[in-house]
Image: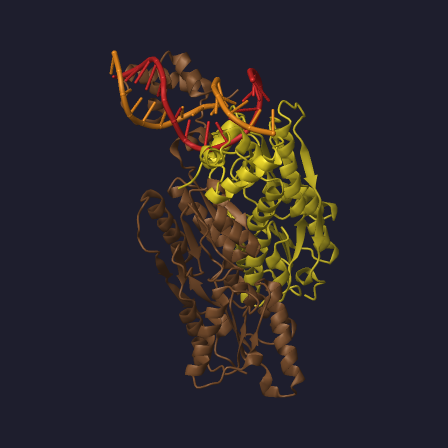
Chain colours: A yellow, B brown, C red, D orange
Amino acid sequence: MSSRLKDVAALAGVSTRTVSNVVSGSASVAEETRARVQAALDELGYRPNVAARNLRAGRTGLIGLAIPELYSPYFGELASLIVHAAQDRSWTVVIDQTFGDPEAEQRLLDGAGGRLVDGLIISPWALGPEELTDRSRDVPVVLLGERQPHGLADRVAVDNVLAADEATTHLLESGRRRIAAIGPQPHLRNETARQRLEGYRRAIERAGLRPDPALEQPVTTLHRKDGAEAMTALLDAAARTDDADARPDAVFAFTDELALGALHIAHARGLSVPGELAVVGFDGIEDGQYANPPLTTVVPDKRQIAERALQCLADRIYSPASNVAPLDIVIPHHLEVRASSGRGTG
Amino acid sequence: MSSRLKDVAALAGVSTRTVSNVVSGSASVAEETRARVQAALDELGYRPNVAARNLRAGRTGLIGLAIPELYSPYFGELASLIVHAAQDRSWTVVIDQTFGDPEAEQRLLDGAGGRLVDGLIISPWALGPEELTDRSRDVPVVLLGERQPHGLADRVAVDNVLAADEATTHLLESGRRRIAAIGPQPHLRNETARQRLEGYRRAIERAGLRPDPALEQPVTTLHRKDGAEAMTALLDAAARTDDADARPDAVFAFTDELALGALHIAHARGLSVPGELAVVGFDGIEDGQYANPPLTTVVPDKRQIAERALQCLADRIYSPASNVAPLDIVIPHHLEVRASSGRGTG
DNA sequence: ATGAAAGCGCTAACAG
DNA sequence: CTGTTAGCGCTTTCAT
């Protein structure tokens, strides 16, 4: 069946040491010997046993990626970039889906899978800064999006407050006055939604308006369905007030999926976009470009998120006792203006 | 730092054998001893070393999932389901993206990563049946979508010919006569596109019409962009003929992403959907539901694809020398009719 | 019920 | 330049 170093050595009439050298190419081997070993290698179709190597090396060459879900476009794109960037570094990625389960998130942080992985990139969802506790970990961790106040892990994220402010300001500048926010998640400790809400309010206030709680529509999860439900709730509530001006003239959704759900309802209700309702999302997923109308969105540089996160891991893994303070890396973003937020006619 | 079985044994004053028994819970241990060992375990925060276990067991508990790309909705959804179903079986999934590179696909099949994984699920893209050759593999492989004529791997797929026939027939029954097909990939050996084309032609012919090569629009990849380009090409070609009847009145796209790209162009050109153009896709991605108008699509039972693929692997992995002939598992599908293919008015 | 020890396959320190 | 061998941490057979 599968051949070991020993088998190859026997066939080539050398020691395992020599075969190992040929395989790894590290030490020098006499040309004639190398050829003989190589022939044996080929004949037996030798493949090194990864488990044995790992045991020996004390490393597995695996890194973990823990995200809430793989099927949503944002995380799919991000995971794709991380897997790709990891390949460049000869790492293999094992994926864990937490589905926003706080216990699953904590378990991963604590155990990190029993040293299955050399490092862990985790995008917390349910856990907030307070809960991201220590527990004796022995693999490096990079947090995506969430800050860890105890200073135990590097962090990579966009400036959510600023980005949300810019998105909202863009809507204000195009003449919108009743801008709804779809996406607050008061039931979670997660920082991200809170920061985007903060940026939204900041922009409103700077424009001399007063944030209207009735326009802040919470959601349970971040799928299209939640965006659709939130939009429905906003429109229904406005209709009940009997006040023609109660209806929002714009929506800032905290994710593109929410925005696409909202867009869907706007269509269903016969609201013209952007005429009667402008829509802005967040994430820059590919979907948005092909929506009708194409979706204005805040685009984080996802490639850089992947790259920087892996760089952090590499630094920690390869520089063992480095006492470098935890990094807080801010990733650039930009507002991609498309048709969904054109100047209103309503 | 990280403690070993030996450390725990020393602390508890027992042998490693006993600690191992406590950890695994396999053999029986005296209550008093167990408590003492457990205390030591907790105190040291012991985590078993996966590499050592793997080496011992001859298994890694990992399975590989090789797909063209993780960021497209279809593969994202599928990967999500597979990762989830694998967790139920205590397997961890490592993901490989082939990006449709034939060499990458072949390399994975050959080496299967040097026994990194206990099994491999691969969704070939560039390789066709002829190229899916043997090479001494020693891990079980499941092929998604593609048949392997040498009978060396199990296969899980929908009946593409039938499904495409149904989709096309649906369009014919709603009165469409010039039905374009977006998605043939003559440059690839891949079976899937070929089978869908076959089903499309079969339906056209059965309706007493003659397949029109001008309506079969090839694509290089399966992204929205390709769908948009293909739709543009079809409309432009029709416009050049100066024949009002040359324009397609329907499109069967071989994937939902292609369909969404086509939909986008229809909007941009001011074509009403489904009035002047009906659109049907394939894959049942979540996007389609929220498109405007919602997309009619062939929905494969992805959950079952994941489940059956893992079942195949489990059978092969746990029943070593089983000489069961390779399975060819056909997954059910259904046509989900939505607004994009309503009865035409044009 | 528990201890001692072999051995999974590999790498590298030591020896020649 | 190459052979011999210890040992990575774990499970499990053999012995008690």
Q: Is residue B29 visible?
A: yes
Q: Residue A54's spot in the image, x, y percent?
A: 51, 31
Taking A65 as reference, is C3 left or right?
Answer: left
Q: Nearer the viewer, residue A189 or B116?
A: B116
Q: Nearer the viewer, residue B116 or B182?
A: B116
Residue pictured at 34% horizontal, 27% vertical? B24
- Residue B237 drawn at (x, y percent): 64, 80
Taking A224 as reference, is B195 above or below it? below
Residue at 44 percent across and 51 percent down: it is: B121
Classify B98 as above or below A97. Answer: below
Farthest residue, direction bottom: B243
The quarter of the image holding the C terminus of chain B is bottom right
The quarter of the displayed image where residue B202 is located: bottom left
Left or right of B59, for residue A156: right
Of residues A179 and A304, which is closer to you in this image? Answer: A304
Residue A112 shows in this picture: no
Q: Position of residue B65 (x, y in %)?
A: 48, 48
Taking depth in this image into account, of A256 and A165 the one nearest to the observer is A256
Residue at the image position 43 percent from the left and 32 percent from the top: B55
Quadrant of res C5: top left
Residue sitting at 53 percent across and 48 percent down? B96
Residue A312 x %, y %? 64, 34
